[in-house]
Image: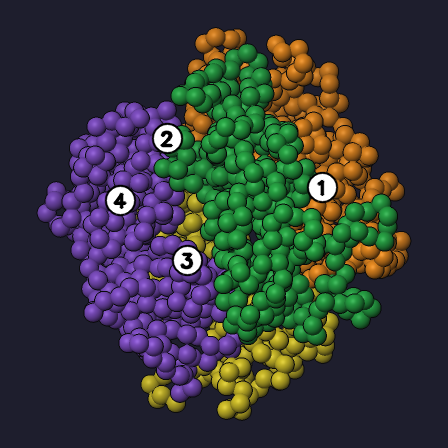
Chain colours: A yellow, B purple, C orange, D green
Amino acid sequence: MIINGVTIEDTFAEAFGMKATRVIITALNETWARNAAVTMTGFATSVIGSGIEAGIEATLGIDQTPDGRPGVSVLLFGMSAKDLEKQLERRVGQCILTSPSSAVYAGMDGAKTINLGRNIRFFGDGFQISKLIGERRYWRIPVMDGEFVCEERTAYGDAVGGGNFIVLAASQEQALTACEAAVVAMRRIPNVIMPFPGGIVRSGSKVGSKYAALPASTNHQFCPTLRGITASRLLPDEMSVLEIVVNGLADTDVRAAMRAGIEAVCALGSTAGIRRVSAGNYGGKLGQFHFHLREVMA
Amino acid sequence: MIINGVTIEDTFAEAFGMKATRVIITALNETWARNAAVTMTGFATSVIGSGIEAGIEATLGIDQTPDGRPGVSVLLFGMSAKDLEKQLERRVGQCILTSPSSAVYAGMDGAKTINLGRNIRFFGDGFQISKLIGERRYWRIPVMDGEFVCEERTAYGDAVGGGNFIVLAASQEQALTACEAAVVAMRRIPNVIMPFPGGIVRSGSKVGSKYAALPASTNHQFCPTLRGITASRLLPDEMSVLEIVVNGLADTDVRAAMRAGIEAVCALGSTAGIRRVSAGNYGGKLGQFHFHLREVMA
Amino acid sequence: MIINGVTIEDTFAEAFGMKATRVIITALNETWARNAAVTMTGFATSVIGSGIEAGIEATLGIDQTPDGRPGVSVLLFGMSAKDLEKQLERRVGQCILTSPSSAVYAGMDGAKTINLGRNIRFFGDGFQISKLIGERRYWRIPVMDGEFVCEERTAYGDAVGGGNFIVLAASQEQALTACEAAVVAMRRIPNVIMPFPGGIVRSGSKVGSKYAALPASTNHQFCPTLRGITASRLLPDEMSVLEIVVNGLADTDVRAAMRAGIEAVCALGSTAGIRRVSAGNYGGKLGQFHFHLREVMA
Amino acid sequence: MIINGVTIEDTFAEAFGMKATRVIITALNETWARNAAVTMTGFATSVIGSGIEAGIEATLGIDQTPDGRPGVSVLLFGMSAKDLEKQLERRVGQCILTSPSSAVYAGMDGAKTINLGRNIRFFGDGFQISKLIGERRYWRIPVMDGEFVCEERTAYGDAVGGGNFIVLAASQEQALTACEAAVVAMRRIPNVIMPFPGGIVRSGSKVGSKYAALPASTNHQFCPTLRGITASRLLPDEMSVLEIVVNGLADTDVRAAMRAGIEAVCALGSTAGIRRVSAGNYGGKLGQFHFHLREVMA
């Protein structure tokens, strides 16, 4: 399959089952909702090293938040509900409770829930006030600029982590320009995040290493500087490679985001130095979700 | 002392000895140096909950970086060199190694050093190359978009954490406007960071809690909603309170930043609803650094 | 009518018939589409002094632009089709033709059209190439970074300029915070722009002046510093006033934007220092469109 | 001369004598100073089509502005003092007077002056108040959010417009990446602006046209798509070209900015697809300033 001169390789992205939740952060204005969210979702690029994968999903208007203030929705992904809860509570305490004028609410409904503000309420030193609206409990915690309002619990659910595609280009600048366009397009899709810095990752890895203690190492077959000394998977005019990893609440969300991103890359096309779109997998044995690029783009 | 109608309270900020390092992140352009730095310094508001306190110190021109590319300098503060090293290595691996076109260098000279890229080099799976320039060792690690260059070690030194001042205003909007102006002014001072979201914190705390297990709780004497039911330290027209916490490489840096910030707050003055500037301390018994506001502003 | 403690005054905004067009600017990425659009819509706050009123309407994804690249849509309003055409051609030539990687297309369909790239094509010095797709003609003009593609003409239509509302608050900071939230909400409404800097205007005017030559002057009845020496329309606790002006393609668009903005202001409410929402009119004699606040908010 | 693999052509930029002034815009915070400045300096890319060339020079801290508030300095260039004054007054009236919380001051001292707020004061309808501090007169004009403070006059002086250099690269993305880095570096140099959108121009022109009425047209010798059909000045691997135009208060300022920009381009070097740096001139007959690239980079 070739789109606008770009080869779509006949391969697939291999993704994994995760648990995910959404929280909604509001504040006096959009700037401060975003300040809190950026801080909270920092250092959250992969579960193995950061404990969680998190990112901003969308900016919310005043008609889309529980308290009628400007807001931001954040998605967080962990390997288990327990991991998710631990990281969520800590990050809310460090980054939302502390942030001027903020409040935080559940962004997902469902039977299975984890703590959101349940333990943070004790920061109120007994002055916190509970409020029950329907079946949802909220806490009002006195702080210096007024009150911090947080919902007691939030639902979580099954999710998909590690959807991806790989962009091979004639130069680093062209690979980066194409991936920037892809991230802009993918941010318009609901229910997904791209957890790496600016949405893009350049250090693709393979399973295993010559150092026995290390579970993963650089994917040498895609490293342009190793072309001459290893079995390379790069063609002669593929000089720089970048990857976009996408997590979503459902496989259909990941698929929609992958399609939007690859379309944006291909819109630039071969005249912009884009050679090929590929994807990362482990032979299909590790992850339960397989996203075949040619089906995604069909 | 009264400046432009704002009372500077006769009190002091109490700060603590910490260990700190600086690293310099460069990339193809300023946007990507900043993307890496924002991700790396996220979730880093206090050592107790985040393991580290970190922030962006400054944007660097091409004449201010080791490789002549646009860059950003980041300061990181921990309770010990060991803590600092552990967090630094993990955050570089998660947030800088992964970020398109990035490189990372020591931003401080000195005899005492910690690992920067020393262990990250093994990601190169044996293909990494060492380069010694003078007494500094660098690693070139093959990645998909080219090479990740990182220095092996960086110096660290004694530092000061927890400098602060508190702004009391007639409304939340006015407190926030004043603190925003303060943060802009303080970011122009070298060798400091303001680790909280957007540089400001609204959940000031006291030592202890009615819940025995908790080491700290809301500073109820500064909470406007508790004015009627506790012994408040707020005057009648002080309706909202915010704090700025500042960490610096030396006490003189913290002092300079506090002064710049308080000047910006007072420049807005009482006509902008600013009533008082105070500071947080523990009676002087816990922290070795005392910044008396009236000396800072003398 | 009182919403969340804020009085909605029983008055109306008086707006005028104008002519408007939309153009779509695309580029290699969103940043550069926006750079071109920001430059093109600068110095365009009122037809009287700037010759045109213009602003960015929305950011467009790759599925929303004619060439499948990231883009921005811009609305321009003039007093006549001739004025509109003159300003449009000049601004495209100065700000879009010149901007790296840009292209510009008609953003509106209809029988009545004005020149877009029709004269700019001559910049190509005879090397320009015409392309007819259906009934739309495009020009490809050779430039240093490749080609500038522009559509020959764009449709225009009747439109509405000067919708507005006025926010009266207890302080300047609170008025500004509320209007910032309103602008964020209004930018989510299609078919409208807020032409003043950052979307807000603080120099409300009245018709006439004590200086015979001047057609307009400061609306002294709303100036807080003149409260003691003129017949003021400000209540005792209304210390600062800001206005939002909104232009739209239809009266229903202006109405929707006014409603979204006033809702955002009222969401902050009287506890955030917001006292009253009013509107500007000329007794109903000059403008053909009257937006009664209480109907807008019904 | 070759720097990091990039050929510095043996040619010169030809620049012109202009008149310039600087004004300082302040506001409640940096965001609003910048909003006003961005609006005021929009549609100001070349004197011929826009009437003026203008841009933001720098962000100013509270210790760098006359009223101790955050600010921005703006440079404006015209062909004569009269042109400069006319555009300055109109743009201040449209874009600064109207912008929330703003004030505007002279940013240059000297014997020769033009009007800044002198006529805008009449907007005050007789309620404006004059204040003389030393030899400088200020006006306080009542507006809805308080008062607009503006200085009566500002100095102006001789200046240099049209300094430039041209970047030739292997692709559009690489040319743009290099010029973005150059603009970041050049913005750190005082006394200069880059008047085109985002600081970069892609529609380089030559004097004359096949259409007799037109004074200028596309510089076909630098257009990559015309390579086969005209006498091209492009080498085989030069596929995209961008230019940076820089205006400065003195020739030494233009020189310093050109050097900083070219250094940033060369720092990326030939491995980033940068082939050559050239400059635009008219054979040396039109402009009084000649900046020889090899002297600039010596």
At horizontal 82% and vertical 68% (from top left) the residue drawn is D229
Q: Position of residue D241 (x, y in %)?
A: 66, 63
Q: Chain of mark 3?
A: B
- Label 3: few (<14), some (14–19) or many (≥20) C-alpha neighbours in 10 Å: many
Q: Position of residue A14 (x, y in %)?
A: 54, 78
List the residue tagged with mark 4. Answer: B256
Element type where label 3 sits in the image: strand
List the residue tagged with mark 1. Answer: D49
Mark in the foreground, 4 or 1: 1
Q: Are marks 3 and 1 in contact (CB under 8 Å)?
A: no
Q: Is residue C293 visible?
A: yes
At horizontal 62% and vertical 58% (from top left) the residue drawn is D12
Q: Are marks 3 and 4 in contact (CB under 8 Å)?
A: no
Q: Nearer the viewer, residue D254 or B49?
A: D254
At horizontal 41% and vertical 34% (from top left) the residue drawn is D65
Q: Chain of mark 1?
A: D
List the residue tagged with mark 2. Answer: B268
Q: Is residue D12 left or right of residue A127?
A: right
Residue kind at label 4, given as amino acid type: Ala
Indicate the quadrant containing the N terminus of chain B: top left, top right, bottom left or bottom right. top left
Element type where label 2 sits in the image: helix
Q: Is residue A78 visible?
A: no
Residue kind at label 3, given as amino acid type: Leu
Q: Are marks 1 and 2 in contact (CB under 8 Å)?
A: no
Q: Chain of mark 4?
A: B
Element type where label 1 sits in the image: helix
